[in-house]
Amino acid sequence: MIRKCNDCQEIDIAGPFPEGPGKVKFLIVAMDYFTKWIEAKAVATITGGQVKKFVWDNIVCRFGILGEIISDNARSKSKMTKYYNSRVRSVAFQPGDFVYRSNNASHAAAGGKLGPKWEGPYEVTDALG
């Protein structure tokens, strides 16, 4: 069960559209793709103050202050990279070895998505490096 999806929310600015009553021609839209919830407001001009007021009135005052702010998680990613690199083994192939080649969905011919994931075996004829 999914309890939250931080990649599923987005705020976007749409427009310019033909002027409406009150000279409005832009839309500020907040979307939650997981629940299909949309909040929108028509504005005449796009400024930082307009977007700030929209977020405050339509998100913060209605649902409360966010529990966490998501950053790019660079520290966590660097720790995962260090952990992976400490355990991965490099393999040097020699001429005469037999190998399989990954068959990505974009390269799969007959079976498409349900086709085999590996092609081969292929014989290594020349090892570079």
Image (spheres, rainbow, N blue to C red):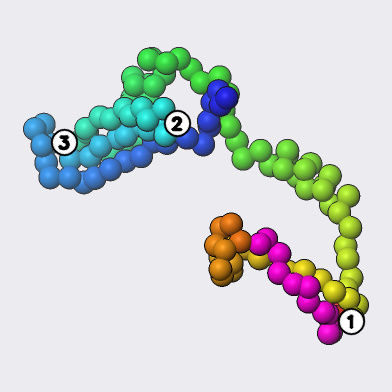
What amino acid is at disc 2?
Phe
- Describe residue 74's horizontal placement relative to residue 122 as left or right: left
Residue 49 appears in the figure: no
Residue 83 screen position, x and y as percent = 84, 44
Q: Which mark is residue 124?
A: none
Q: Which mark is residue 24?
A: 3
Taking 30 as reference, is 1 left or right? right
Query: What is the secondary structure assignment of the residue under circle 1?
Result: loop
The residue mark sitting in front, 2 or 1, is 1
* Tag 3: amino acid: Val
Q: Which region shows up in magenta?
A: 116-126
Per the image, the residue denoted by label 1 is: 95
What residue is drawn where x is 78% and y is 73%?
Answer: 121
Q: Position of residue 4 (x, y in %)?
A: 54, 26
Residue 111 image-quadrant placement: bottom right
Residue 41 is inside the magenta segment: no
Task: Identify the residue shown where x is 59% and y is 67%.
Answer: 108
113 left or right, relative to 87:
left
Q: Is residue 120 magenta?
A: yes
Where in the figure is residue 60, as x and y percent of width and height? Answer: 41, 18
Numbered label attached to residue 34: 2
Cα distance, mark 2 to mark 3?
29 Å
Q: Residue furthest left?
A: 21
User: Horizontal placement of 31 versus 81: left or right?
Assistant: left
Q: Is residue 60 visible?
A: yes
Which quadrant, please, contains the C terminus?
bottom right
**Rendered location of residue 97, percent (x, y):** 88, 76
Mark 1 neighbour density, 10 Å: few (under 14) some (14–19) many (20 or more): few
- Depth check, mark 3 against mark 1: the one in front is 1
Q: Amino acid at mark 1?
A: Pro
Q: Residue at x 89, y 58 (%)?
A: 89
**Local crowd size for mark 2, using a 10 Å CA cut-off: few (<14), some (14–19), many (≥20):** few
